[in-house]
């Protein structure tokens, strides 16, 4: 298995955040669209048995997610300046990737900034039967915008495939747009740098996850510190006519989770089956991990 880094550019706003499990789903759809059902079934089987393609969430160029910090000791008599520094540190969502990887190019300057600005947009619900606006069907969505100078992002892929195959799969994943409202121009993404091999700098028994995941066996890890979120995935593509458009709800740990293990590992989690009445549908719940000490 090798760890690759790919760079992408956001060319339009997003509606769906660039989470690793959602990106993995787009990878599978890209294979289905280009190579057919048998190829995607083989890919899923390879990921179940050999974890052949494990992908991170996307981070601003030159950064990775911020590790969940240790529980701090109580500090007495803080000055206003010290308190301000602590508050600022809590707001940071990303850390410089140069601390963890052998990357030569400089990172984007995002100090004091957030990579996305949220904008609320109102929509009307449309009846597919009458093709007219549903009375009282007004709803809102949050669009995520980036500045031009902050539109480049890094994705990390742990894979048994070569760099050319990893690059191709990522290009297929984004070629028709990403996430919700891609049919109206949201989520236009371009791969701007092909997959290049990267090496982790640090070695130790303390790891950080780079995308959402589950823990298959809690006995294999300790001192897990993580945020969680509920994923209620929705199927798409040729499955939209399914009797049930939603996957079963799962609870995932967020990227940035930190844990310890005595094993030397490259990923955590697994590909989940039985998440829908259609047995072909799966849910990505594995993440690349990197040592952080």
Image (tube, rainbow, N blue to C red):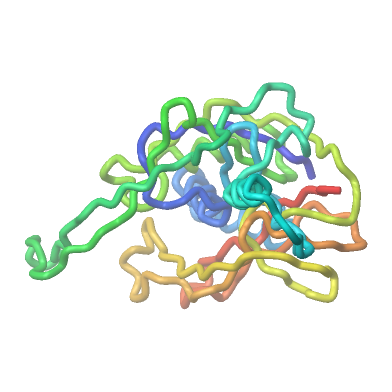
The answer to which image quadrant residue 50 occupies is bottom right
Q: Write the residue at 61% across / 60% down.
A: 254
The answer to which of 25 and 290 lies nearer the viewer is: 290
| Residue 65 visible, this orientation | no
Up/down of 247 relative to 50, above or below: below
| Residue 175 visible, this orientation | yes
189 displayed left or right of 268: left
Up/down of 163 relative to 27, above or below: above
Q: x, y (%) of residue 246?
A: 41, 71
Q: x, y (%) of residue 165?
A: 64, 36
217 displayed left or right of 185: right
190 displayed left or right of 158: left
238 displayed left or right of 92: left
Q: x, y (%) of residue 148?
A: 42, 27
Q: Residue furthest top?
A: 105
Q: Write the residue at 72% across / 65% down.
A: 225
Q: Write the residue at 64% across / 51% down.
A: 83
Query: Which quadrant holds the N terminus?
Result: top right
So how many labels did they put on this image?
0
Q: Write the residue at 90% across / 60% down.
A: 263
The answer to which of 268 and 161 lies nearer the viewer is: 268
């Amino acid at each position: 298995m090798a760890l690759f880094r790919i760079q992408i550019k956001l060319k339009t706003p997003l509606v769906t955040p660039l989470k690793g499990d959602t990106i993995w789903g787009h990878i599978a759809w890209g294979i289905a669209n280009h190579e057919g059902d048998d190829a995607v079934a083989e890919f899923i089987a390879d990921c179940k048995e050999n974890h052949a393609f494990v992908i991170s969430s996307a981070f601003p160029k030159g950064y990775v997610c911020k590790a969940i910090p240790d529980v701090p000791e109580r500090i007495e008599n803080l000055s206003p300046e010290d308190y301000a520094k602590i508050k600022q540190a809590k707001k940071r969502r990303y850390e410089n990737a140069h601390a963890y990887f052998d990357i030569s190019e400089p990172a984007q300057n995002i100090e004091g900034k957030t990579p996305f600005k949220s904008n609320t947009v109102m929509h009307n619900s449309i009846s597919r039967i009458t093709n007219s606006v549903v009375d009282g069907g007004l709803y809102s969505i949050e669009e995520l915008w980036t500045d031009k100078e902050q539109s480049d992002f890094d994705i990390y892929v742990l894979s048994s495939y070569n760099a050319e195959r990893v690059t191709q799969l990522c290009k297929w994943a984004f070629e028709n747009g990403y996430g919700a409202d891609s049919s109206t121009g949201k989520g236009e993404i371009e791969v701007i740098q092909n997959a290049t091999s990267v090496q982790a700098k640090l070695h130790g028994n303390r790891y950080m996850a780079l995308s959402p995941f589950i823990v298959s066996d809690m006995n294999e890890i300790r001192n897990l510190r993580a945020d969680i979120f509920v994923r209620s995935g929705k199927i798409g593509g040729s499955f939209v006519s399914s009797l049930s458009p939603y996957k079963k709800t799962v609870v995932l740990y967020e990227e940035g989770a930190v844990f310890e293990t005595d094993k030397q590992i490259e990923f955590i989690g697994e590909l989940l089956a039985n998440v829908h009445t259609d047995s072909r549908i799966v849910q990505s719940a594995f993440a690349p991990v990197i040592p952080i000490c």
